[in-house]
């Protein structure tokens, strides 16, 4: 049958194209071979701490995805800073947060010859080749929110360190147990990386003498599911009638716990604290269920990213450890190890200031 | 390939040469518009006509163009394969997993493409052996394969692929020609020749134009379709390999939504969703046109939403216009002849 032959040809063609890509390389390469080959470029430029911040810098923000309320607040801070710097602000980004959708946006920004690209990477490696191409053309790359691989960005704006958050959670436990009594943690899933590392620091911190009378009785897991978190809260209160406070380092957990307490007669007796979003927590702060909770300010992340980008583009810093720069209203910052700049300790939200925030 | 060379095989498959010359001219028009868009954008859009941007353009359209080749065949037979993006994602995920397990990349690439062929064969089995309609079948495998991809890699990504492979994929030769253009051009040439200059190609048109007639005239329609699904899977696997190297990242969510871009480009290129009609040059024109528009509009800071609107409107025009023309012609002919001839086959789409 004559129709068979071209059918085979089609199949062979695919094999041929594949062979081509092999021919380009040759030899057997395994993961361990590749590790030794894949070396990264190093930074050789010199910083001039006294250089003036340039005006008219083209600073582009590329968040994980557009039209996300949290992201909007982050880049809003960036826009404010770019205005203060008398630069040109631009916001681009994909509608979906998939790994590779940011790459063509980075390529476009390279073509448009931006001075600074501030990116929240959906995938730390998928954006790397493009970001390095940008850097080869003199564009400064700032990662914020989610880091890109450290070989392909100049600075990472870290919203909070593990240490900083862990200490904050311990302080909250101390404050709301009154320095004496039982506290519990309502976490996300048992294998949530962030939460586990924060809780680990929190436990270390609670070995200090001032915590002698504060007892962490249980870490419960609400799996970042509203209903499960709600039930776990209920369970904690039944199992530990003397409980003074629940610390929940996850926005889902703290909101569910607050909802349970506010509708029960534990209201006013058991404190809820942890990390939460002001818009989710507002009603519980106002009805007195929650006295205080914490989170970094997303707008400050974008703000700091813009200033760090301007400092790089003006030659004040190059991204090496120990370099210093000033970020407008946020004050002075120092570049840490691996080009990380830490925003600072989380902000406390309470009845006094919660209405100043909308995110 | 010019329009005149593509007409004869199509003619053999259809009953009306009038609507065919029209379709041939639609393909020519799409190719012409795509080339025009390329020229206009190079002249008008700042930074469009650079060699770096050309590489970006080719890398963006590569997976769409690759997958569109077998998709053209499949849609011409009157079927569809919506699982292509999920096959790309699953092969990419498996590629990452095998790499983690210490296999050499030279082993992994053929295995990945073979896996794609197997996934395609599953689609083909459902469509040709169990005689299930391809739309629900491939919507099913779209979800199934994507789900399996997450089973393989979860949320993690494998990124440490050898730099010489990733750099080759993104690299150029002779100054400005992207390396990946070579396999793409060779495959396009081959698929074009098979579709437009072989008996197999004619049986593809015949299967889509009138499946019953094709069966009666001795064409093994099921075998043709099964083969096409296998090739579609293999090419999706190949696209998965290129995708993984291009982005240095094997992930379960690679290529999400790509199937819609592919189907859009194929239809824009003048392939009838009802089967039996269309040409490969037209499809490549459709792919190029969409890619040029996207790239140029993005450079002009047109928002994503507006980009989607442009793509959507183009797609509707590409489906509507040929049908409107054929509808008008048919009614004109009817009035002129006052005859009792049945309407042109494509009229059911109006």
Image (cartoon, rainbow, N blue to C red):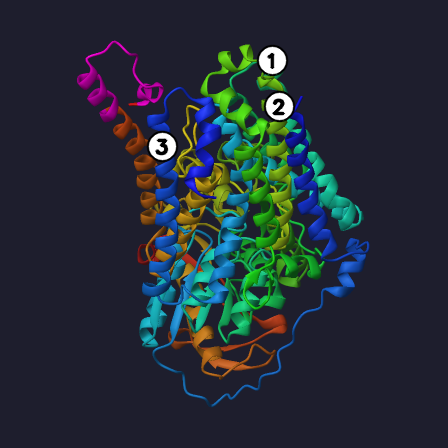
Left or right of residue A212: residue B278: left
The tag earlier along the polypeptide, 2 or 1, is: 1
Mark 2 against mark 3, which lies toward the viewer?
A: 3
For residue A171, above or below residue B228: below
Residue at (48% x, 22% y) in the render: B208
Mark 3 against mark 1, which lies toward the viewer?
A: 3
| Residue A54 image position (x, y, % from top left) | 39, 82
The tag earlier along the polypeptide, 3 or 1, is: 3
Closer to the camera, B77 or B344? Answer: B344
Locate the C terminus of chain B and report the quarter of the image it occupies.
top left
Residue B21 is tagged as 3
Secondary structure mostly seen in the magenta stretch: helix
Q: Does the CB distance between marks 3 and 1 fall below 8 Å?
A: no
Q: Quadrant of residue B194?
A: top right
Q: What range of the chain is rendered magenta? A: B328-349
Separation of residues labelled 2 and 1 (CA atoms)? 12 Å
């Amino acid at each position: 049958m004559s129709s068979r032959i071209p059918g085979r040809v089609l199949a062979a063609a695919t094999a041929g194209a594949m062979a081509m890509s092999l021919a380009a390389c040759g030899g057997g390469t395994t993961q361990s071979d590749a590790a030794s080959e894949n070396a990264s470029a190093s930074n050789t430029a010199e910083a001039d701490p006294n250089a003036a911040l340039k005006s008219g810098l083209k600073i582009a923000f590329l968040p994980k995805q557009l039209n996300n309320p949290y992201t909007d607040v982050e880049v809003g801070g960036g826009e404010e800073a770019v205005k203060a710097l008398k630069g040109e602000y631009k916001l681009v980004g994909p509608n979906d947060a998939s790994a590779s959708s940011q790459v063509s946006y980075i390529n476009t920004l390279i073509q448009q010859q931006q001075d600074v690209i501030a990116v929240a990477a959906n995938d730390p490696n998928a954006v790397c080749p493009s970001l390095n191409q940008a850097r080869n053309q003199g564009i400064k790359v700032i990662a914020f929110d989610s880091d890109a691989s450290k070989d392909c960005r100049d600075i990472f704006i870290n919203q909070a360190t593990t240490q900083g958050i862990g200490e904050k959670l311990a302080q909250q436990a101390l404050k709301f147990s009154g320095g004496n009594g039982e506290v519990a943690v309502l976490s996300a899933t048992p294998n949530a990386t962030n939460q586990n590392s924060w809780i680990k620091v929190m436990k270390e911190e609670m070995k200090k003498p001032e915590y002698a009378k504060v007892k962490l009785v249980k870490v419960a897991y609400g799996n970042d599911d509203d209903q499960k978190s709600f039930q776990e809260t209920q369970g904690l209160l039944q199992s530990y009638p003397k409980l003074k406070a629940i610390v929940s380092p996850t926005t889902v957990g703290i909101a569910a716990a607050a909802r349970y307490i506010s509708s029960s007669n534990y209201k006013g007796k058991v404190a809820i604290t942890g990390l939460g979003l002001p818009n989710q927590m507002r009603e519980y702060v106002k009805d007195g269920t929650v006295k205080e909770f914490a989170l970094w300010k997303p707008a400050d992340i974008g703000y700091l990213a813009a200033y760090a980008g301007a400092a790089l583009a003006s030659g004040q810093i190059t991204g090496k450890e120990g370099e210093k720069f000033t970020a407008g209203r946020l004050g002075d910052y120092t570049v840490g190890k691996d080009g990380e700049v830490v925003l600072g300790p989380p902000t406390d939200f309470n009845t006094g200031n919660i209405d100043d925030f909308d995110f | 390939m010019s329009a005149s060379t593509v007409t004869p095989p199509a003619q053999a498959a259809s009953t009306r040469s009038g609507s065919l010359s029209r379709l041939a001219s639609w393909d020519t028009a799409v190719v012409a518009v795509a080339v025009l868009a390329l020229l206009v954008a190079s002249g008008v859009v700042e930074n469009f006509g650079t060699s770096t941007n050309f590489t970006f353009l080719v890398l963006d359209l590569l997976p769409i163009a690759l997958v569109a080749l077998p998709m053209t065949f499949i849609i011409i037979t009157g079927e569809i394969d919506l699982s292509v993006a999920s096959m790309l994602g699953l092969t990419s995920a498996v590629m990452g997993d095998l790499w983690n397990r210490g296999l050499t990349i030279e082993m992994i690439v053929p295995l990945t493409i073979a896996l794609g062929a197997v996934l395609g064969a599953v689609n083909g089995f459902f469509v040709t052996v169990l005689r299930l309609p391809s739309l629900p079948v491939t919507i099913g495998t779209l979800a199934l394969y994507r789900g399996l991809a997450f089973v393989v890699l979860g949320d993690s990504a494998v990124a440490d692929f050898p730099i010489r492979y990733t750099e080759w994929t993104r690299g150029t030769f002779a100054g400005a020609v992207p390396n990946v253009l070579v396999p793409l051009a060779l495959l396009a040439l081959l698929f074009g020749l098979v579709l437009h200059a072989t008996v197999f190609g004619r049986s593809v048109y015949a299967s889509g134009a009138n499946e019953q007639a094709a069966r009666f005239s001795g064409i093994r329609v099921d075998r043709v379709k099964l083969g096409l699904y296998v090739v579609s899977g293999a090419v999706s696997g190949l696209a998965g390999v290129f995708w993984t190297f291009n982005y240095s990242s094997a992930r379960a969510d690679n290529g999400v939504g790509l199937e819609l871009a592919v189907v859009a480009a194929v239809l824009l290129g003048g392939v009838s969703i009802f089967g039996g009609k269309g040409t490969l040059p037209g499809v490549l024109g459709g792919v190029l046109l969409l890619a040029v528009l996207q790239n140029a509009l993005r450079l002009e800071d047109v928002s994503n939403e507006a980009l989607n609107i442009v793509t959507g409107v183009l797609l509707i025009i590409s489906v509507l216009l040929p049908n409107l023309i054929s509808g008008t012609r048919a009614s004109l002919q009817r009035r002129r002849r006052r005859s009792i001839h049945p309407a042109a086959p494509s009229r059911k789409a109006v």
